Amino acid sequence: MSDKPITFKKNVREGDPLILIDFLEKYSKLSKSILKKVLNNGGVWVRLFNKSKLTRNRRATHDLNLESIVEFYYDPKLTNMEIPQAIELTKFKDWGLWYKPTGLLSQGTEFGDHCSILRQIEKAKNKAWMVHRLDREASGLMLFAYNKNAAARFSELWQKHDVRKFYKVEVVGVIKTGGEINDSLDGKHAKTTYTILETTEYTSKLLVEIHTGRLHQIRRHFDMIGHPVLGDPKYGVGNKNSEGLRLMAYQLMFRDPFTQKEINFELPEKDLGVVF
């Protein structure tokens, strides 16, 4: 069997099987045991005739109708990969803080959501809403809402910049004093501040706060000033290593929109065995 990805998008026609897994078997030529994995992992999307939305479908026996649209995304490397597990750090009713390990996506792709922290939390809490993102290569704190009301309230906090976000970062080169980076990103204002935690002969460990939420803000800003983040696969020269991206979401500070209590949560690194 080929180890190459298989994808297709097909309309259900006269004579096609009208049971989803049978339809997939006909056009993918894969066994039903593999197809059930793909379905469970979220790699199958269906839009029924007269419906406007294409949605993930995990049910093998789902009934199709003529002119339904089926999209199929299978990558054997993703299907069989070992998935790192998120860790729940708080026990609140409406929301929670979780630890996302390196290698876990924030949310799924068309090939599935089994590699995402969002899917793991959905399974644990029945429902979950992602409030903010963290790069796959990064690790650290993420906040998730467990109902629509909480999702709306926390999304508003993020949109209003009422959340302080701190990261531990290790960069190439020695930085002697704390500072501020205000270089625009994608034509928009971006502000990053940092203090020194520790330096070695060749690197600096920093506590970084981002005051705006631009794409890859920390990684791009430190590359721009000549101190790229260690292990960054996309930005920087001479910063590759064997440990992976040295960027950890370490601390969140905000007012709980339900209790109005001030939350100041730092990642319990020693308890997790992930000391930066």
Image (tube, grey):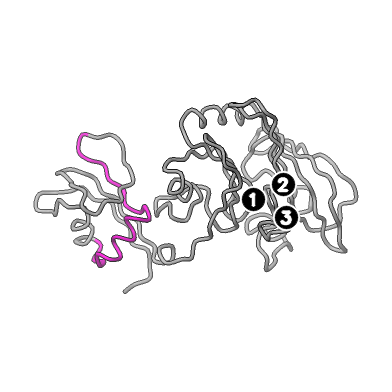
Element class at badge 2: strand
Residue at the far right: name it: 176
Residue 167 got which mark?
A: 2
Q: Which is in the foreground here, disc 2 or disc 1? A: 1
| Part of the protein shown in magenta | 28-50
Element class at badge 3: loop
Q: Sort mark 2 into few (<14), some (14-19) or many (20+) by Cα contacts within 10 Å.
A: many
Q: Earlier in the sequence, mark 2 or mark 3?
A: 2
Of the pair 222 and 256, the residue shown nearer to us: 256
Q: Sort mark 1 into few (<14), some (14-19) or many (20+) by Cα contacts within 10 Å.
A: many
Question: Residue tagged by mark 1?
Answer: 140
**Is residue 114 visible from the viewing direction of this image?**
yes
Q: Earlier in the sequence, mark 2 or mark 1?
A: 1
Q: In this view, does 119 lie to the left or right of 144?
A: left
Q: Examine the image and state in which quarter residue 51 appears.
A: top left
* Quadrant position of the N terminus in the picture: bottom left
Amino acid type of the residue that numbered disc 1 sits on in the rendered structure: Gly
Amino acid type of the residue that numbered disc 3 sits on in the rendered structure: Val
Of the pair 270 and 247, the residue shown nearer to us: 270
Task: Give me the C-alpha separation between circle 1 and circle 3.
Answer: 16 Å
The reply to whether dot 2 and dot 1 touch (C-beta < 8 Å) is yes
